[in-house]
Image (cartoon, coloured by chain):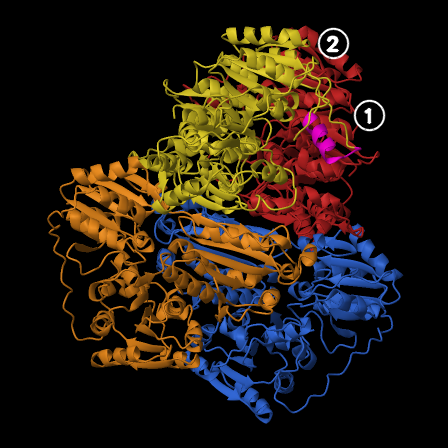
Chain colours: A red, B yellow, C orange, D blue
Amino acid sequence: MTTVFGNPGSTELRFLRSWPSDFRYVTALHEGSAVAMADAYAQLSRNAAFVNLHSAGGLGNAMGSVFTAYKNQTPLVITAGQQTRALMPNAPFLYARDAVVMPQPYVKWSCEPARAEDVPAAIEHAYHVAMQRPFGPTFVSIPEDDWDRETVETPLRRVIADVVASPEGIETILAALAASARPAIVVGPGVDRDDASAATVALAERLGAAVYVSPLSSRCSFPERHPNFAGFLAPVRTHVVERLREHDLVLVLGAPVFTYHVFTDGPPIAEGTVVVQVTDDPDAVASAAAGTSIVATLRATLDAVLARMPPEPRAGSGVARAAPRPLVDTLSGALALRALAHVLPADAIVVEEAPSHRNALHEYVPIERAGTFYAAASGSLGWALPAAVGAALARPSRRIVAILGDGSSMYAITALWTAARFALPITFVILDNASYAAMNQFGRFLGFEGMPSFDLAGLDFVRAAEAFGVRGVRIELAGDLEEAFRACFASPLPTLVDVAVDDAAATIY
Amino acid sequence: MTTVFGNPGSTELRFLRSWPSDFRYVTALHEGSAVAMADAYAQLSRNAAFVNLHSAGGLGNAMGSVFTAYKNQTPLVITAGQQTRALMPNAPFLYARDAVVMPQPYVKWSCEPARAEDVPAAIEHAYHVAMQRPFGPTFVSIPEDDWDRETVETPLRRVIADVVASPEGIETILAALAASARPAIVVGPGVDRDDASAATVALAERLGAAVYVSPLSSRCSFPERHPNFAGFLAPVRTHVVERLREHDLVLVLGAPVFTYHVFTDGPPIAEGTVVVQVTDDPDAVASAAAGTSIVATLRATLDAVLARMPPEPRAGSGVARAAPRPLVDTLSGALALRALAHVLPADAIVVEEAPSHRNALHEYVPIERAGTFYAAASGSLGWALPAAVGAALARPSRRIVAILGDGSSMYAITALWTAARFALPITFVILDNASYAAMNQFGRFLGFEGMPSFDLAGLDFVRAAEAFGVRGVRIELAGDLEEAFRACFASPLPTLVDVAVDDAAATIY
Amino acid sequence: MTTVFGNPGSTELRFLRSWPSDFRYVTALHEGSAVAMADAYAQLSRNAAFVNLHSAGGLGNAMGSVFTAYKNQTPLVITAGQQTRALMPNAPFLYARDAVVMPQPYVKWSCEPARAEDVPAAIEHAYHVAMQRPFGPTFVSIPEDDWDRETVETPLRRVIADVVASPEGIETILAALAASARPAIVVGPGVDRDDASAATVALAERLGAAVYVSPLSSRCSFPERHPNFAGFLAPVRTHVVERLREHDLVLVLGAPVFTYHVFTDGPPIAEGTVVVQVTDDPDAVASAAAGTSIVATLRATLDAVLARMPPEPRAGSGVARAAPRPLVDTLSGALALRALAHVLPADAIVVEEAPSHRNALHEYVPIERAGTFYAAASGSLGWALPAAVGAALARPSRRIVAILGDGSSMYAITALWTAARFALPITFVILDNASYAAMNQFGRFLGFEGMPSFDLAGLDFVRAAEAFGVRGVRIELAGDLEEAFRACFASPLPTLVDVAVDDAAATIY
Amino acid sequence: MTTVFGNPGSTELRFLRSWPSDFRYVTALHEGSAVAMADAYAQLSRNAAFVNLHSAGGLGNAMGSVFTAYKNQTPLVITAGQQTRALMPNAPFLYARDAVVMPQPYVKWSCEPARAEDVPAAIEHAYHVAMQRPFGPTFVSIPEDDWDRETVETPLRRVIADVVASPEGIETILAALAASARPAIVVGPGVDRDDASAATVALAERLGAAVYVSPLSSRCSFPERHPNFAGFLAPVRTHVVERLREHDLVLVLGAPVFTYHVFTDGPPIAEGTVVVQVTDDPDAVASAAAGTSIVATLRATLDAVLARMPPEPRAGSGVARAAPRPLVDTLSGALALRALAHVLPADAIVVEEAPSHRNALHEYVPIERAGTFYAAASGSLGWALPAAVGAALARPSRRIVAILGDGSSMYAITALWTAARFALPITFVILDNASYAAMNQFGRFLGFEGMPSFDLAGLDFVRAAEAFGVRGVRIELAGDLEEAFRACFASPLPTLVDVAVDDAAATIY
């Protein structure tokens, strides 16, 4: 962990003193951005990232992103300066009272060491907790005078946290697969997080299973043009039941059973359909709506299952996925995304936060590789723009494309500055409908009227980009889209493309 | 509470449905801004303000501002949508697990009602807790389906929370004053918060007392050109001891004893100096470093004390306050502030967040009226810019001037959009040294070297302003300052003035 | 605070080393008893009491009593040993992880000092928080090695926390009184806690007001044979409404508005009846069901009200209180209590925990003096038996009578040992119906059937008493009661009287 | 879960109504006992046990035992009644404010369902969380009116939570074993908890490894007369280092690395000794003092390791364990335990809580079978006496022997009543030194003087037993011991044996 993401203040000065030349301090202009950058960096580097915040105020500003990191199951070691120990009895300026309580319940472990000498051990402890399943953020509050105290070296330790399901678990999976005539697999973010996409493809092919993406999955866990790919489940109970009705077995991998956004009544699965869940997330097991659950690391468990299965594939699932709907010429989000898909480099990494265009994205921008799609599992806004910056720092040789709503991008617009400062080759695409369009869509979906206006008129994204040193361009004609995107992908620097879209007819589910 | 500050999402749609025409929804582009706007609005309107956030993500984004509101002792009723009750067992999208825990320990009360029918009672409860001494934020988590449930009317209740010190307390104060030959008064934010400035002036004049401002006070509690005004205490123990050494009595009103930022050793007050504190903040009493503390509402208690004192004033304190130091011509923060002071309307309201210019502000912009100066008591950044918006909404007939650092303003720059949308006559002054200059100053103060760069090169504030619909102007010559400010004060619309300052020599304390 | 109540373990040994000869360590055999003893001791001595517990296990055992102390609003400084700081990173034996969290939410303040040097300041802080209104317990976790560290002396501080209602509050009360033709006063535990009984009697007499006891009040706040005394309110909404219906004003002093145990629907007060509450408990204000609430210290405020009222009393309330019902000869709890009342010394202090005899107690044992009746406000069992011990230690010259159920006494029966060890003149009266009779009564009240047995057959209280060195006697004939009680009151030592009662017909409300 | 342990109150009446005839309600006279009974019951039945407590007061009384259950890693579903939902806004009698917070941080999950309909799902959720690794208690707060609401059936779910270490983990263990010339195994409670004793014996025999018991292990994880058994480690760093110094590999199974009670400085293990830990407890991994840690279920992982090892055993460890020291004739704890060992049935289950005799117990009462020794992992007192009751209920055909200190037994003496009521064949052995002898021993160990007295003179255990319907006998002559114990083991009923011991010379470590 030699890259530190942060936004420092006076209580962190001692930590920053005599900064090692082989460490990198990535300054964000807002703490929420620092955590989101670190989140994507950790996801892409498959290792916990280190964050340095400024006491209660800094941690407070970051809490939305901490919540997202918790839902993303991203390993983070978040530190915040605390006031000098000797001052605490008088409740000094910048004092974080009950510092360990503040990030609850959205960190896995929280600590203010009882002695300066124990700060290294606390950071190591935080690291090991963050890296245990399910991954997640941890927090260490560090009194600023602690950095002046000599301490003994902490012995280097190693932790092996991957596990395989027990023999009973493996047998249960094999028996369910063997008994199924029409199996489906539902993949969630845990598959990609656990580097288990290839194993899942192998399993799907051997089974001839249809593969669905779990509702609102935050990562791409199955190639979306693969013949067995069967599409995306909506976070609505009745929708899930209908889509999965034809299957006698649903194997849920690395996902809850199931994530809902809108309430509809009824059973969670059609009668007669067997559900088996495999996940490393005990909460997802305890809150599952149905079925048998197996707690284990996904990839190791799939490997063990595959080793026990007959090698020859069964016939395919026969699920014919609908072709993308044709589009009219109006410059809509869908049209913009289709244009983007035409010119998107094959190994580009997509970071998404455009709630009112999520359906269109899935329809027109099929993701085909593991590790190339990231969204916030929390539904909290302000994550993707800085996450794109963190992704670019983790993968300097890759193109990063952030697909953002106009509203979404505003929660963390200052992260553009960090992109400019590190000269990162990111394309920020704003699907700009000049409103919180998801609110309008959702209101229509629910039949609501008389709400306050959700329009966002008056935002100028080109100037916003320029304010932070990023080149900005506004596109108002569909015909200009591909060339604009191509120019971005050819540039070694960050670019923002503000696409004026009309999405009056878009629907949320 | 008919003005609602917020940033909504799907879980708040039912609340917003059929929005009453006599209610005003003030949309902020970031939740931290919504809370900061509400904070200033509440301070200036002397009533709790209502905030509407979006589940755990929205509350998370706002937590830095919640922390500041807590330190500011500002009464707020903060609500956040929660998922539909029926979905909770399956941990749905946007679900805030343990919602009441998240804002701890920085709200006074936190509740998710056990039944939909109890939401109105919970909001009323939150209001009454927020409005009890010490004021502060409260939180109510509201499952979104609750808005569909009929409920009975909650009877209107009235709470009288102001209190006078007990007879023993009054006698203690009177005895201390009578016994003192060289009294000092230290005023904190509680004086202005409690509308007790006039009473404090009367008391100081009768006593002939020197009046100091408590370290880092977030409000103006004494006219800074009054003959008894003796200046500002720095948040450093040895500094406080030295400044107050000549007094045999220090009466601390509405402030801690004392707020420190930098640790220095030694006793909190010179031997022989008696300290008496009057405050409505029990925490400030429990953590006081010395003296006798009296818990009571300030204004009512000062009135009671004044009624018992001889009416004729004693001779003045004789504390000669240093004249502001002369300035060289370099365009520094100090020079800019002096220019501002020349043209500042007498009833303008100043909102401050320029950490590296706080000393200069106090030196060159004396505040003379109660209720015209506001800063964040927390030291947390990102408050003042949106707070200026809230102040302008609360006081539509007044000029609001936000004095901001370049770094500070970036934590909440999108609040400019709300200023533009409501066409508020705010002047945003950016004292732009192109760095986190307070960090450099503090590092010099502590003798540190080798820190990562704290420069903020590459920010273009004029374009940033324009991105949000606010007129922006950049000033690089000292001679242009006054005219630029005058133009702002003549405009009915918000303006941002980016002043390029050189503050290499500025000191933090 | 030179009397320490506790139950120590290894982590407290350093604290106990070289114990000062003028300090008293009162050992309880269970931590719940230690806290309950300290609770009563603090109530009777009107000062915070000090408790010393053994790490998380000891605090855990005590939490029921901590909850009761919180509801009793009793000032306590509870300390617990914590493991050596240097061991904490390895989660040692007896380590209290997140020690400050454990007693939440039932302490007012909780702290583990950041340095050994700050332990004295933390204890003083805890003391000042405990002694602010509303009183309550506080907690300090003390790493055991801290006692080996030298520290500087903490300056002695003084806090004056009593307050008078503001002029607006006083006027509001006076106006309500003046406008009322048929006023009632409802007194709660806050009256006696604040030593305001005499002032309340004076007020009632001047007003000619009927005085009711608030539901389940834990202290005697009005002499129960006073002509204005009108009886006890049951914790049932409809009952309260009916009893108070004839009054046009209800002045609630030191009590919630109102405490309910059983749910019944409807408004909290009859239409047209004005409610004014005066209390020092902000929670009781925020959760009041109706009326105007004034937050202030009771006695100081009543004094201020009385000083403004006409001195001559108004005509009496005319509320005729029902005479106690005649009793049949069966040895019931009522009969035993009537016998007790006959011989009870006038200045005896009664501590009560006999849920199924509470009504009979009020009917047959009228309490006439302030400071002579104590019960647990929490409804939690196991408090009264050790509380009687604490009361006896606080008032060595007084007779203490504990009126206990057979079930209740068993939660803390070992506290008899401490009574024996300190040779305290306490009479423990067990109203022994050989069952959790309140459960049966409540079940009948609600019309329930088919519950598991609540009988407690097989307990021998005489042997239990003897096991702990206390003389025990069993009474099975009504005629033996008075002589048995007289013998107790003549003895300088503790005695337990086990009264075999038949309460098949008793009712809960 | 058809056996319910509890101590009910009014808020649980609706739950108890129409109690099913095939359910058993085990009443304890104190809530701490109810939880401890359930704890042992769950440990012995290898399934979560159900506890029913009375609101905040009942949970509060139980918190010491909840803490112990947490440290014991025992799966429990603890429920407590909460007040009627409709009453909550007025803070009613018996209301548990923030009920989910109270048991923190010592439950794994805590919930008050948002709707009555969700109570069954919450209980199921709690069950599944309790039964995931590491096992532990969970809490559900249930508003009492919820039992009146109809709800839909929750589908039955199945969870498989056992896991095998990943291939990398297995290889790491095998490589370490292969490279070791002088291996040691340290066994903790996790071995017996996971039914992995036999596998551990097999592993030790194949390796020729010396087997030590981890400091303060709460269960017997290796037969103590087995040739490879090498004794008990003391919870002192230097002691552990010395005992393990001769080994080049220490394989720690189901235990922390390591549990310390007394602080001594220095490294946790001798240089050159490799430490590999296998445990299902992530906290024990994160807080380990040294080595490589592997998170996995123990038995499944040992099976996988054994399957990969050469079948023929290596030569034995050659660790010669010291014979028990000869004893003088004074009636000491050691002498009593030696006598007990002589007549103890081979399949008896020992429950221990005699802190000052723990060393003697290990020396003179070797435990030889898995699942026959239980102590509290927390060091919290008051567990073993009721735990013996729970053990007897779980294993009706076995003899249960509780070995208790006089002090220890007093924390939960009323649990004898439950033993009598269920006529359980338990032998309660009180090693009665008439003091908190462990405190005196510890004080001597640390060289402390001048402490308050820790004597417990005046307790009569025979009468205490009889008070609760249990036969009691006091033994004051060594020669009477064996016959007394034999009589107990021949009786179908509970018996208490109070052994007057002189342990002036006993040492703690």
Question: Against A53, is A281 above or below?
Answer: below
Q: Answer with mark 1 or mark 2, whichever residue precedes in sequence.
A: 1
Q: Is residue D242 left or right of residue D283?
A: right
User: Start and end of the magenta stretch?
Assistant: B437-450
Q: What residue would you read off at disc 2?
A: A483
Picture coordinates of residue A236, whole percent (x, y) = 52, 32
Q: Secondary structure at mark 1?
A: loop
Is residue C331 rendered magenta in the image? no
Q: Is residue B422 left or right of residue A157?
A: left
Q: What residue would you read off at disc 1?
A: A397
Looking at the image, which is closer to me, B450 or D17? Answer: B450
Work out whether residue C74 can be spotted. Answer: yes
Picture coordinates of residue D270, whole percent (x, y) = 83, 63
Q: Quadrant of the N terminus of chain B?
A: top left
Picture coordinates of residue A375, whole percent (x, y) = 65, 29
Looking at the image, do the residues carrying marks 1 and 2 touch, with CB atoms under 8 Å apart?
no
Looking at the image, which is closer to me, C122 or B223? Answer: B223
Q: Secondary structure at mark 2?
A: helix
Residue type at mark 1: give it: Ser
Q: CA distance from mark 1 to mark 2?
A: 22 Å
Q: Which secondary structure is most common in the magenta stretch?
A: helix
Q: Is residue D478 left or right of residue A51?
A: left
Is residue B446 rendered magenta in the image? yes
